Image: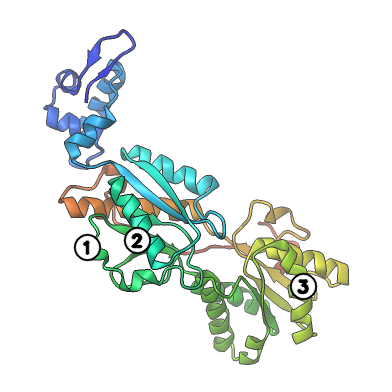
Amino acid sequence: MDTTNTAGRRVTLADVARMAGVSKQTASRVVNGSAQVTDETRARVLQCIEVLGFRPSTLARQLTAGRSLTLGVVNNTAVGHLMCGDAYVGMVRQADGMGYALLNKEMSDFSRASVDAMLGQMLERQVDGIILAGPEIGNSHDWLDDYPLDDLPMPLVAINARPRAGVDVVGFDNFLAGQNATRHLLSLQRRRIGHLSGPNNRWVAQRRIEGWQAALDEAGLPECKAYCVEGSWEAESGGPGLQRLLELCPDLDAVFVSSDRMALGVLMEAQRLGIDVPGTLAVMGIDNDPQSAFFTPPLTTMTQDTPRMAEVALRQLVRRICDRHGEPYPAGCAQEESSMLTHRLIVRQSTLGDVAN
């Protein structure tokens, strides 16, 4: 773990330990983010690291740990990236803070041959763990049901996938999101509530449909379950979706839309048809897109903190890696946390009229 400071002098971990008045092992624990160090000692060692300009050698850390300190992230290219923008940046930042780098792999085919090839490449790169970040579409994740995951030398964590025995899954409770969105509309005395869903081959969309249906059953409105139309997640499917819902139920008084982008299309179509929102038709979405507060009218929606989901998945993976090697968890993920995240309701004018966010 040697390095060179700006003056050209080699600075070692032993130099840091000597200045901090601790053992080299303790200094190493601080560098590696171990929780087995007091806050006072950690602060003192970190201060000495800054003073001396010490930077751990990644190669030395890999040799010491006997691992690559690399995590594989597998995306589904057929539908774009789940791990993009703020979510991916947050994951990179979280990994970097615990001394890991990320290796991305893109897949558009999840046949057994393609999965075997992907896992073979990950093994060749000696990744310490894998995050399956692509959304579950159709049978894309079915290989998890019968693959001998216990034979893999590294753990795997899936994101926003169907729960499976023996597989760590981190994601949102989309059933509860659909249920709570519908309950909000019911609380406003809406009784003819339609649903514009995401693509029906998506696990997330299926769960939101089931949550909407459950809330309708609770309210004694099973007939409304016929008012469901499939969309594409995108704005261009919102207008046709509303038209179809109005064909199914001409006196529709509310619609739960499974994405804010589709809800924008719904609002535009309602305006074109002269339908008063929210007077005649209450509209709510899900995602809390940054632009949704500026729709006309501003959109009631449900938050979905995707960056947090990505970071929780990464911390879960690091804990599983530590479990396999009998090591303490790094300070950044020492606390166990729930792998099932929940949405939060954001009420705006599209359901309640003139209200504050």
Classify residue 337 by image quadrant: bottom left
* Residue 349 in view, yes or no: no
Quadrant hosting residue 99 = top left
Which callout, 1 or 3, points at the residue further toward the start of the chain? Answer: 1
Residue receiving disc 2: 116
Q: Label 2 crowding class (10 Å Cα cut-off): few <14, some 14-19, many 20+? A: few
Q: Which residue is tagged 3?
A: 240
In percent of width and height, residue 196 lies at 67, 74
Q: Nearer the viewer, mark 2 or mark 3?
A: 2
Q: From what the image shows, is residue 347 above or below residue 5?
A: below
Residue 238 pos. (x, y %): 73, 68
SS of the residue under disc 1: helix
Q: What residue do we see at 30% from left, 69% from top? A: 147
* Residue 55 percent coordinates (x, y): 29, 24
Residue 169 figure quarter: bottom left
Which part of the image, by quadrant, shows the C terminus? Answer: bottom right
Q: Residue at the left extreme?
A: 23
Mark 1 = which residue? 151
Closer to the eye: label 1 or 3: 1
Task: Give the spatial CA distance, label 2 vs label 1.
Answer: 13 Å
| Label 3 crowd bin: few (<14), some (14–19), many (20+), radius 10 Å | some
Instruction: First in sequence, mark 2 or 1: give its number.
Output: 2
